[in-house]
Structures are given as C-alpha cells and as structure tokens.
Image (cartoon, rainbow, N blue to C red):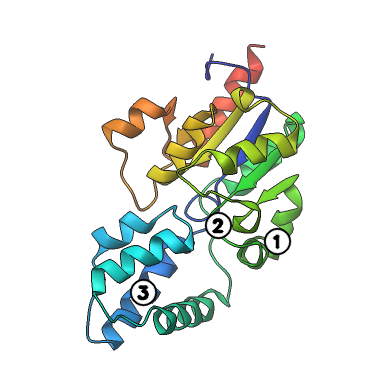
Amino acid sequence: MSFPRTVKAVVFDMDGLLVDTETVIFRAMQHVAGGLGGELPFATFQRMVGLQDAASNQIVVDHFGEGFDLAAWTKAVRAHSHEQMAAGVALKAGVVEILDYLAEAGLPCAIATSSSLASVQRNLTPGGLIDRFAALITKEVQEQGKPHPEPFLKAAAALGVSPQDCLALEDSHNGVRSASSAGMMTVMVPDMLDPTEEMRTLTVRIARDLHEVRELLEAQRSIQ
C-alpha cells in the first residue's frame, strides 16, 4: 500500500505547496532590506517559512536588531509582494491534477495555512481553485499556529474525518511538525527547504511534487 492507512481526506498547506508565493515573499524582503541598507540572508528567511506572522516577525527583529521599525518593514514587504502578485501567482506543479483526482475519487480536502483568509482568497480565487476545498483553516481561526498541531486538527474536524485517516501535504519543516504531531500521514513536498533527517522520520514520504502524490493515491485506490 502506498500509505500506512487508507486515505479518507487530504489537507494541504498553501504557500510553497499550492502556489509559488514563498519565492515572491523572499524577493520582496530582499528588496525592502536593500532599501534599508541591509540584507536578509536566505538562511534567515528559511527559518520563517511555515510560521505565523508573530513568530516570523520576531526572527526579523532579532536579525536586524534593537530599534528596528517592524511596522514600516511589514508595510513595505506587503506592498512590494502584493505588487508582484497582482498579475497572478504561479501554481506549483500538479495542483490542478491532484485536485481533479480528489474530486473524481470523492476525497474531501481542506487547507491548513499560516496565512490569512484574504491571502488564500487572493491566491486561489483566480481559476476557481478556492471552491475545491471544503474547509479553509487560516490564521484567523487558529489560537496556536504551526508547528503546533491545532491547524491540522481543526482541518480534520471541519472535514469530519479522523486525523489518522487524513493525508497532510506540506513543504515546510514547521508544517511537517504540525501535521505529524496531529497524527496525520504526512508527505513533504520540498520547496524552499530541503528535507532533513528529522523530516524523513516524521513523514511517510518525501515527494518530488504533487504529481507524485497523486500517483501514490491512485496506486492505493487501485489495490483497495
């Protein structure tokens, strides 16, 4: 069997998994940092991937030091990234295909993201993708964000499926930690972060892209 248990639902992260937003955000941060006469190393940005705003903002403040104007930084990064995303954000490989397969197979799906509902709507409404998901667990409905399991537990509850019967798809280390601690079968599809030995321990698979995940789901279905 492709997975240790029959998959009854699928929970997706958004940024870096469904849409190529992480690249845009990193470039926006580099642009703003340069305008301030500083720099934001890729390694620093990598520590922020998958976190909610409060946690990632603290990393920025720690990096730039005491007296850093976080409000101005946030406003500038948001403005620059929104400008870059205005023309649309590229979908990651295999998104449409896996969503088509899940619909055909009758498997419900949800999003569990550290991003806002507005961000989800902005990135997924074009092309009608947002209507493919039965539940959207955004930062507004989370008391504790990733790597805490709450986002994925809420997604499972919204779908009416036990977490143990859900497949979670993530690109970030904190997302994998969140999904795994929720008890879900977890697959990492790397984007900005390479898989580590910890990630290999917490996941049932490291997949090259969503095409491979779809193939695994099809293989499981064919032997049931």
> Which residue matches tag 2?
91
Observer-side mark, 2 or 3, equals 3
> Dot 3 lies on which element?
helix
Q: Is residue 2 left or right of residue 191?
A: right
Q: CA distance from mark 2 to mark 3?
A: 21 Å
Q: Is label 1 in a helix, a strand or a loop?
A: helix
First-in-chain label (2 vs 3): 3
- Relative to 3, is 121 above or below? below
* Residue 168 pos. (x, y %): 55, 35
Any mark on residue 127, and which?
A: 1
Task: Tell whether label 1 touches label 3 (CB within 8 Å).
Answer: no
Residue at the image point whose x is 48% and y is 31% from the top: 181
CA–CA distance in space, label 2 to label 1: 10 Å
Does residue 122 appear left or right of residue 2 in this picture? right
SS type, badge 2: loop
Q: Amino acid at mark 1?
A: Gly
Q: Which residue is mark 3?
A: 29
* Residue 4 seen from this side: yes
Residue in view at x 51 percent, y 56 percent: 15
Using residue 89 as the reference point, say whether residue 162 is left or right of it: right
Question: In this rendering, which labeled residue sits more in front, label 3 or label 1?
Answer: 3
